[in-house]
Image (cartoon, rainbow, N blue to C red):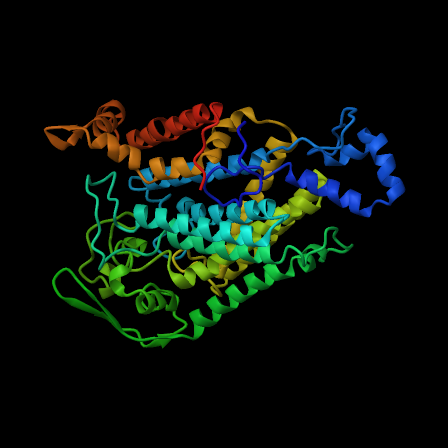
């Protein structure tokens, strides 16, 4: 396996270099710091016993060796989990149109599509913990964090700012008066990555090498990370429930439309503080014009699918709303904070059983809290607002799922069924850009015969899948599974074989 420079900072997309095995080295350092000079001399002569604690599995035995240097290992479950997030993104983006139940919830609630973004942020946090355990040179680390943030923003604006219209239109270019400054990469992931990574890097000398006894020791050791999460939570909650939202207007199909608000603390589609902040800070022309709320029952009788507007539909149904906006991104810092907590557990707890105990209990606690908040109507689960209950629900699900992956792949050693997810996870940035964002499909569609619709991609969808199965739903689903997900799994495996990875 080709390995990236272990000093490079990691993020949620792209091939994560030496993100594991690093915790093995960490435990080795802890052992050395706690040893006396006499014990250090013995350590050099009694390698097998001392090295056994560095293994991934508790019951593995280290073969006799004349060196104490442990072999670096990747946490394969982290690669597989990242690959799963990419696969889910492709599935819901390309099959969600015919299966609206897996597409984003129109407003309150949580569907399969609504797990994708928080999963990535969870992975971002976990990867940062492993990458920034040690910071040999602070200035270099800070520089790399800012450079990687800028790269994420650049690719986000190119892919989701309105410049690229593929694969649906063979057109490039954007009116700067309407460019979308928000998106998955340029706003949500870039901002969360920058905040979490800066806190982790700047506090590296303030945290202990060895945890003190006690259930809250890991929270105390990383109190600055949790303080950052608390600040984000307070800013979001105070703004959401106290900011006054006045009436606002947007350009409708025929004339300007005015939405009546004049209220505080509203959590509905039209008059919430999340949308108001984006309209004020960025301007209404730079906001996403196709929000999921247009599929609400109040807007269309075809709900949860898209359809013709009702005659009595509210004025705001055609209005813009930014699902990756400023205030909701501040709330998303919590998703990264919970992810980095899981990374800290991986670093400090040597036993698989103890790690899983910590992870599963945290995940279950978050799920229970989210369900209580949602079903008591205190704070509904809402992806568009990135509500606190949504943070807890999706982070809890991510924690439980990652724990399951870790147990099956890294503890039990059952890797073969998940290899395609690992391969995709190692080349996540490439699959995201070329696959999930449709760049490769758009390139192939660009080679058409007589008219743009007469291209290889459209022919395969219509004649190989939809016509054969005589069903648009079944045909589309099979196309996504075999012509997209399977294709990218195989290609990622080939690239992995040759050590080719797209790294930011």
- Left or right: where does residue 177 sit relative to residue 128? left
Please provide percent x and percent y for residue 81. 51, 38
Question: Which residue is at the front of the view, 304 or 418?
Answer: 418
Residue shown at the point (64%, 39%) measured from the top left? 22
Q: Quadrant of residue 478?
A: top left
In this rendering, the answer to whether 186 lies above or below 431 is below
In this view, the residue farthest toward the left is: 450
Q: Residue at x 21, y 30 (%)?
A: 458
Position above or below: 171 against 336: above
Can the viewer see residue 71?
A: yes
Give the percent coordinates (x, y) of residue 260.
26, 73
Taking depth in this image into account, of 12 and 2 the one nearest to the observer is: 2
**Which quadrant holds the C terminus?**
top left
Say left or right for 303 vs 411.
left
Q: Position of residue 352 (x, y in %)?
A: 69, 38
Above or below, 438 against 243 in this view is: above
Q: Give whichever of 146, 229 is nearer the camera.
A: 146
């Amino acid at each position: 396996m080709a390995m990236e420079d272990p000093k490079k900072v990691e993020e949620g997309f792209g091939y994560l270099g030496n993100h594991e095995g690093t915790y093995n080295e960490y435990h080795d350092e802890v052992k050395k710091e706690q040893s006396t000079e006499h014990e250090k001399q013995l350590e050099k002569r009694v390698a097998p016993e001392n090295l056994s604690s560095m293994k991934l599995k508790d019951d593995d035995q280290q073969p006799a060796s004349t060196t104490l240097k442990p072999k670096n290992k990747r946490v394969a479950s982290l690669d597989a989990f990242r690959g799963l997030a990419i696969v889910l993104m492709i599935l819901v983006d390309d099959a969600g149109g015919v299966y609206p139940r897996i597409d984003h919830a129109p407003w309150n609630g949580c569907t399969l599509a609504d797990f994708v973004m928080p999963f990535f942020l969870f992975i971002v946090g976990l990867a940062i913990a492993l990458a920034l355990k040690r910071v040999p040179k602070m200035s270099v680390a800070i520089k790399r964090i800012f450079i990687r943030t800028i790269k994420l923003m650049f690719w986000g604006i190119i892919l989701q700012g309105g410049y690229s219209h593929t694969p649906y239109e063979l057109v490039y270019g954007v009116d700067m008066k309407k460019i979308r400054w928000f998106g998955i990469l340029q706003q949500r992931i870039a901002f969360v990555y920058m905040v979490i990574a800066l806190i982790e890097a700047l506090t590296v000398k303030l945290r202990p090498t060895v945890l003190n006894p006690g259930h809250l020791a890991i929270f105390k050791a990383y109190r600055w990370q949790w303080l950052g999460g608390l600040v984000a939570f307070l800013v979001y909650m105070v703004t959401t429930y106290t900011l006054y939202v006045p009436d606002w207007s947007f350009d409708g199909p025929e004339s300007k439309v005015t939405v009546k608000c004049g209220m505080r603390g509203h959590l509905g589609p039209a008059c919430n503080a999340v949308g108001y902040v984006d309209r004020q800070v960025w301007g209404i022309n730079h906001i996403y014009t196709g929000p999921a709320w247009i599929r609400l029952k109040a807007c269309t009788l075809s709900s949860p699918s898209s359809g013709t507007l009702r005659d009595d539909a509210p004025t705001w149904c055609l209005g813009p709303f930014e699902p990756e906006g400023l205030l909701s991104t501040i709330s998303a810092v919590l998703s990264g904070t919970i992810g980095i907590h899981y990374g800290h557990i991986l670093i400090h707890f040597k036993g698989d059983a103890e790690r899983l105990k910590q992870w599963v209990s945290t995940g279950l606690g978050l799920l229970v809290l989210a369900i209580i908040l949602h079903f008591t109507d205190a704070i509904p689960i809402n992806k568009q607002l990135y509500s606190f209950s949504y943070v807890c629900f999706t982070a809890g699900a991510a924690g439980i799922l990652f724990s399951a992956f870790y147990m099956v792949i890294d503890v039990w050693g059952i890797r073969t069924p998940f290899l395609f997810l690992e391969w995709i996870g190692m080349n996540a940035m490439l699959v995201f850009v070329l696959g999930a964002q449709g760049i490769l499909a758009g390139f192939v569609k660009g080679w058409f015969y007589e008219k743009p619709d007469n291209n290889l991609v459209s022919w395969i969808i219509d004649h190989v899948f939809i016509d054969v199965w005589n069903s648009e739903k079944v045909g589309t689903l099979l196309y996504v599974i075999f012509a997209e997900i399977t294709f990218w799994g195989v290609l990622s495996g080939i690239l992995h074989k040759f050590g080719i990875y797209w790294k930011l």
